[in-house]
């Protein structure tokens, strides 16, 4: 299986990173994608990918919550890395809009997202979108970009079934993680409603651990728990969920 979004380079894994990687592989998760956040974490991300090139692939992008008035230097670093001849990134991310905590830099977030979307198109790479309390704003921005069909994933999807269908119609995959196991989570309805071929598995580790680990540190080894819940709500087998989501991840990110 593929964990299409995890932060195993995060400080939360400093005490047992090697063991966390080994647990993931033992659980059948032999490919893990590392999204970029900002320059403060690039060296950690790159070091992990270099240590385990057989398991990790990288994305690069400027996270919306890292956007401030002075975003140009950070964005220039992302541009330089993405367009480096030997870059090897499998996607542009994680990028997007986040209005959950603060709307102060909304216009700056829009500008940063638009530029990175254009770079992704120029490079022929899929995007990994982080969207929080901003689905209407995101859909409006995508409509304005007018690319036609998009390529990418709406990571850690938190919208409605209707919004999920809209995203799929635009060409996006839906990233489903541990929240699908939470009681009364609307994500379970999303997981049951969208085509299985458009679902990607992810953890967002160390965040959003699935039940029975909710509230604790998440890790890529928990991907099978997420796959099992998706299989349950869809009335299918874990094997089918694993096979279809892995094929979709491999196709989208060219793994």
Image (cartoon, helix red, strand yellow):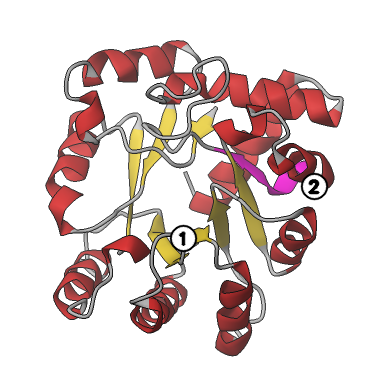
Mark 2: few, some, or many residues within 10 Å (few <14, many ≥20)?
few
Question: Quadrant of the image for the N terminus?
Answer: top right
Q: Nearer the viewer, residue 95 or 244?
A: 95
Residue 184: image location, x then y, percent: 73, 34
Decide which of tag 1 and tag 2 comes sooner along the chain.
1
Q: Nearer the viewer, residue 196 or 247?
A: 196
Q: Nearer the viewer, residue 82 or 20?
A: 20
When asked about the image quadrant of residue 165, the answer is: bottom right
**Residue 211 visible here:** yes
Report how far apart the C-alphas of labels 1 and 2 lie in the structure. 28 Å
Residue 83: image location, x then y, percent: 25, 70
Which label is found at residue 195? 2
When asked about the image quadrant of residue 57, the answer is: top left
Magenta region, residue range? 194-201
Residue 253: image location, x then y, percent: 49, 51
Q: Nearer the viewer, residue 115 or 51?
A: 115
Please state if 103 lies on the left or on the right of 136 as rendered. Answer: left
User: Residue at (68%, 65%) from the top-left corner?
Assistant: 171
């Amino acid at each position: 299986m593929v964990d299409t979004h995890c932060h195993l380079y995060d400080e939360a894994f400093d005490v047992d990173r090697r063991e966390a990687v080994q647990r993931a592989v033992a659980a059948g998760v032999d490919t893990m994608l590392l999204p970029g956040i900002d320059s403060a974490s690039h060296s950690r991300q790159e070091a992990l990918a270099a240590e385990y090139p057989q398991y990790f692939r990288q994305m690069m992008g400027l996270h919306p919550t890292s956007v401030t008035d002075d975003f140009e230097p950070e964005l220039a670093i992302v541009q330089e890395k993405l367009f480096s001849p030997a870059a090897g990134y499998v996607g542009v991310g994680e990028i997007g809009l986040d209005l959950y905590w603060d709307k102060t830099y909304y216009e700056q977030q829009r500008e940063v997202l638009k530029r990175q979307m254009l770079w992704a198109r120029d490079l022929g790479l899929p995007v990994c979108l982080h969207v929080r309390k901003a689905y209407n704003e995101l859909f409006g921005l995508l409509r304005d970009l007018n690319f036609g069909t998009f390529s990418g994933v709406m990571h850690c999807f938190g919208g409605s079934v209707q919004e999920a269908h809209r995203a799929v119609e635009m060409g996006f995959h839906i990233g489903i993680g541990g929240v699908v196991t939470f009681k009364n989570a609307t994500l379970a309805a999303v997981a049951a409603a969208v085509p299985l071929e458009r679902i990607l598995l992810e953890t967002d580790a160390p965040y959003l651990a699935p039940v029975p680990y909710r509230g604790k540190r998440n890790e890529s080894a928990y991907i099978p728990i997420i796959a099992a819940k998706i299989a349950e709500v869809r009335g299918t087998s874990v094997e089918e969920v694993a096979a279809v989501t892995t094929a979709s991840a491999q196709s989208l990110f060219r793994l």
